[in-house]
Structures are given as structure tokens and as C-alpha cells.
Image: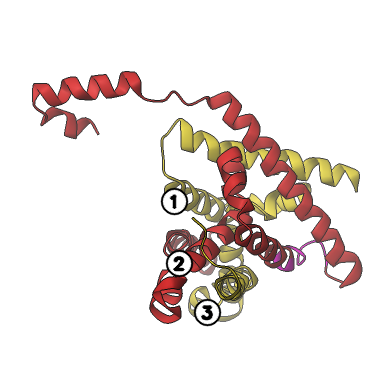
Chain colours: A red, B yellow
Amino acid sequence: MGNKKKNLTPAQQKYQGLQQKHEFKRPILKNCLRAFWVGGLICMFGQAVTYFYIYFFNFTEQTAGNPTVATMVFFSMLLTGFGVYDHLGQFAGAGSAVPVTGFGNAVISAAIEHRTEGFVLGVGGNMFKLAGSVILFGVFSAFVVALIKTILITWGVI
Amino acid sequence: MLAMFFWAFVVGGLFCVIGQLLFDVAKLTPGHTLSLLVVIGAVLDGFGLYEPLIDFAGAGATIPITSFGNSLVHGAMSEAEKHGLVGVLSGMFEVTSSGISAAIVFGFIGALIFKPKG
């Protein structure tokens, strides 16, 4: 940002000042409280699903996370399809985006949005438009971390 | 059991607050924020810090997107212990498979059932 500012004409700089003055001030505390309780409730619901899998399908505390995530993505599909998740996202911000339901919502809403362009090029091509970056950076960072750790273990450092 | 629900709420909520602060204070887009959180999750697991958090907070740690990075590293490491460096690639999606496949399957079903609004 700092770099861009230097190359502006005075008129542009003046406009930027004006724009900053009128920019909508974000109510940070209120947003954080909303994100906290909505995100917390989603995780609490996830905990209930986890217990469901532990008691009825013989998962352990460690492995139950896996089917729980799949179930949460399923609920996310229903909420996204009926248009509820959009409103939740407006209200809760990161509270609905950070839990894995937000990841599901990103995939599913992109899939639904592009169905008019056909199933192969529209749905297939755009499904991971938003969530692709999460997968890319997740996989790449996990690759680097696991590589370093494996090399350190083979060398006997840790 | 009730304590577990409480800690899931608090820890999960705190992850979301971190995300909200990245939105509002650091002015990152949701895409950048989620990518950053995934990387943080992977690095935390690299130092062995994420597993204790899951034991402590349950779904409070497995539901936020950071756990995606954690389970990627976990799958890669568990294969790497058996097969060495090749395992890093072959085991990458071992644990995360359900999240990704659920997203793909339900995403497609969603696109079949629902029509775009607005």
C-alpha cells in the first residue's frame, strides 16, 4: 500500500484522504463478540456430533473428528442451499467462516452459483474457486512441515 | 462431558475471534484469512502443539479450519514414519479425506438440488 501512495498525483492523494474519512468504521468489538458466540456455538454443536459418533459408531476421541467434519459439511450444504448461511455470514463474519462449515459453504455456494454454466465447466470448474487457496496453502505448508520433521527425525535430531 | 462442551465453545469461539481480528484489524480478505489459519494449524502441529489442544477442547479444536492443516501434517507424518520421505506425499490426505470428499460430494448434490438465488 505504501508504495502505491507515492506514485499518486496530488488530486488522487486528496481523494484517498477523503475516501478514508468516509470509510465505514468497523465495529471491531461487536464483530468479535458475534464471531465468538456464533463460532463457539458451531463448535459446541460439533462436539455434540463428536459424542454421537463416539457413543453410537465406536469412534475414539481422536478419530471422531473425521466423520464430525463430514457431518458439519453436510449441515453446511443444507444451510447454504436454503440461503440461511449467507445471513449467518453477514451477521457473524469470521464466526461462520472459520469453522469447517465455512469451508463447506465456500465450496457448495460456488457449486450452486455456477450450475447455470453447466455441470462440467460450471460446477466442476468453479467448485474450488474460493476454497482452492485453503487447500493449496494447507497442503503446501503441511508438505514443508512434514518434510522438515521427517528429515530431522531421520537425522536423529528429534 | 459438560466441561468439554464449555471448552469447545470457548476455544472454538477464540479461533473465530482471531479470524475476525484478521478480517477487521489486518484487513485481510476471507480467502487470505482462512489460508493463513490453515498454515498456522500446520505449523502448530509441526511443533506438536495442536494435539494437546484437541485433547483439551475436542470439537473446539477440530471444527475450526486450523485443524485442516493439523490433520494434513498428521496424515503425512504417520505415513512418513512407515515409508520415509515418500510417505509425506502419499499420506497427505489420509486423515483429511473425509472433509474434502464430503465437500465435493455434498457440493455436487447441493448443485443438483438447489437453484441459485438472487
The three-letter amino acid code for the residue at tag 3 is: Ser
The three-letter amino acid code for the residue at tag 2 is: Phe
C-beta proximity under 8 Å, tags 1 and 2: no
The three-letter amino acid code for the residue at tag 1 is: Gly
Residue A149 shows in this picture: no
Which image quadrant is residue A25 in?
top left
Tell me whether marks 3 and 1 sit on the same chain.
yes
Whichever of labels 3 and 1 marks the residue nearer the N terminus, that label is 1
Q: Nearer the viewer, mark 2 or mark 3?
A: 2
Between the residue at mark 1 and the residue at mark 2, the CA separation in whole angstroms equals 12 Å
Residue at the disc numbered 3: B90
The chain letter under disc 3 is B
Q: Looking at the image, which residue is at 84% across and 46% down?
A: B4
Q: Looking at the image, which residue is at 10% across and 31% down?
A: A7
Residue at the disc numbered 1: B31
Which image quadrant is residue B6 in?
top right
- The N terminus of chain A, quarter of image: top left
Residue at the disc numbered 2: A128
Q: Position of residue B25 (x, y in %)?
A: 45, 30
Q: State the extent of the magenta-drawn residues as a range.
A: A60-67
Other residues around mark 3 within 10 Å, as few (<14) / some (14–19) / many (≥20): some
Residue B11 position (above or below residue B51): above
- The C terminus of chain A, quarter of image: bottom right
Residue A68 position (above or below residue B79): above
